[in-house]
C-alpha cells in the first residue's frame, strides 16, 4: 500500500500513520520527524531547517524532495509507505510525481483528514501541555501560522489529487479508533 496522508497540523496524521503501519505492514515517512531528528543531531541539514521550522514556515522544496527521494530507495519502503507531511505544496507534489514515475511506483490513495481550525488549535495546545518533549513550533502564534501555511499552500493538494481520482476524505474529529476504521473502509472501496 502506497499512501499520502494529508491534513492540517493537529489533524491526527501521526496517530493514524502508526495504525496504518500496523494494519498494512508499511513504513511511515514523516518529513517533520526526519527534520526534527536532523535538528537534534545538529547536522548541516538540521541547522538550515531549525529557524524556519520554529516559525512554522516551510523549509525549501529542494531539501524535502531530496529527503524523500533518497528514502524511497531504501529496502524497507519496497512493501509500501505512508508519506506524512509531504508533499506540502503543488511544487512538491509535481516533484513527487516525477520521482514516482522514475522509480516506477504508483500511489494507491491520498487520505485527507478533515478537522476544523478551532478544534486544531485546541488539540495542538493540549498536546503541547501534555507532552514532555517541547516542540519549538507549538505555541499559539506559530500554530496560527502553520494553519495559514496549510490553508494557502497545502490544501490545494486536495483538488490536485481529486483530479487524479486518488482522494479519500475522512472525518478526523471522530475518536482515534473510529478514524482508523473509517480509513480502512475507505481504502477497501
Ligand atoms: P505539523 O504537525 O505542523 O503538520 P510536521 O511535523 O509535519 O508538523 O512539520 C513540522 C515543520 O517541519 C513544518 O512546519 C515545516 O517547517 C517543516 N516541514 C515538514 N515537512 C515539510 C515539507 N514537506 N516541506 C517543507 N517543510 C516541511
Image: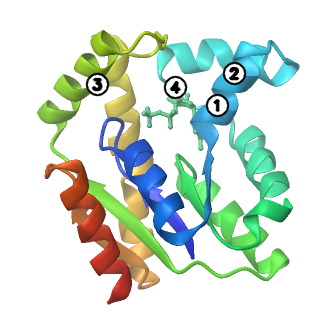
Mark 1 Cβ and ligand 1 under 8 Å apart: yes
Structural distance between the alpha carbons of marks 3 and 2 = 21 Å
Mark 3 Cβ and ligand 1 under 8 Å apart: yes
Whether pointer 1 and pointer 4 mark residues with C-beta atoms closer than 8 Å, the reply is: yes
Residue 49 has which mark? 2
Mark 4 and mark 2 lie on one chain; the one further toward the N terminus is 2
| Circle 3 or circle 1, nearest the eye | 3
- The residue at the point 29 percent across, 10 percent down is 129
- The residue at the point 46 percent across, 53 percent down is 17
Residue receiving disc 3 = 124
Q: Position of residue 90 (x, y in %)?
A: 54, 57
Q: Residue furthest bottom?
A: 189
Q: Position of residue 142 (x, y in %)?
A: 37, 16
| Circle 4 or circle 2, nearest the eye | 2
Q: Nearer the viewer, residue 33 or 115?
A: 33
Structural distance between the alpha carbons of marks 1 and 2 = 6 Å
Residue receiving disc 1 = 59
Amino acid at each position: 500500500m502506497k499512501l499520502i496522508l494529508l491534513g492540517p497540523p493537529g489533524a491526527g496524521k501521526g496517530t493514524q500513520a502508526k495504525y496504518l503501519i500496523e494494519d498494512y505492514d508499511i513504513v511511515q515517512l514523516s518529513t517533520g520527524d526526519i527534520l526534527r531528528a536532523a535538528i537534534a543531531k545538529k547536522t548541516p541539514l538540521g541547522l538550515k531547517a531549525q529557524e524556519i521550522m520554529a516559525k512554522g514556515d516551510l523549509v525549501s522544496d529542494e531539501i524535502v524532495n531530496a529527503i524523500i527521494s533518497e528514502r524511497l530507495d531504501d529496502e524497507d519502503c519496497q512493501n509500501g509507505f505512508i508519506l506524512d507531511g509531504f508533499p506540502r505544496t503543488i511544487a512538491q507534489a509535481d516533484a513527487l510525481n516525477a520521482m514516482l514515475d522514475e522509480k516506477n511506483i504508483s500511489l494507491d490513495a491520498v487520505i485527507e483528514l478533515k478537522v476544523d481550525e478551532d478544534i486544531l488549535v485546541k488539540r495542538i495546545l493540549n498536546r503541547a501541555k501534555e507532552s514532555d518533549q517541547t516542540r519549538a513550533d507549538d505555541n499559539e502564534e506559530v500554530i496560527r501560522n502553520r494553519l495559514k501555511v496549510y490553508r494557502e499552500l497545502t490544501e490545494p493538494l486536495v483538488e490536485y489529487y481529486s483530479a487524479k481520482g486518488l482522494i479519500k476524505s475522512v472525518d478526523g474529529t471522530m475518536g482515534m479508533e473510529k478514524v482508523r476504521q473509517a480509513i480502512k473502509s475507505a481504502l477497501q472501496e
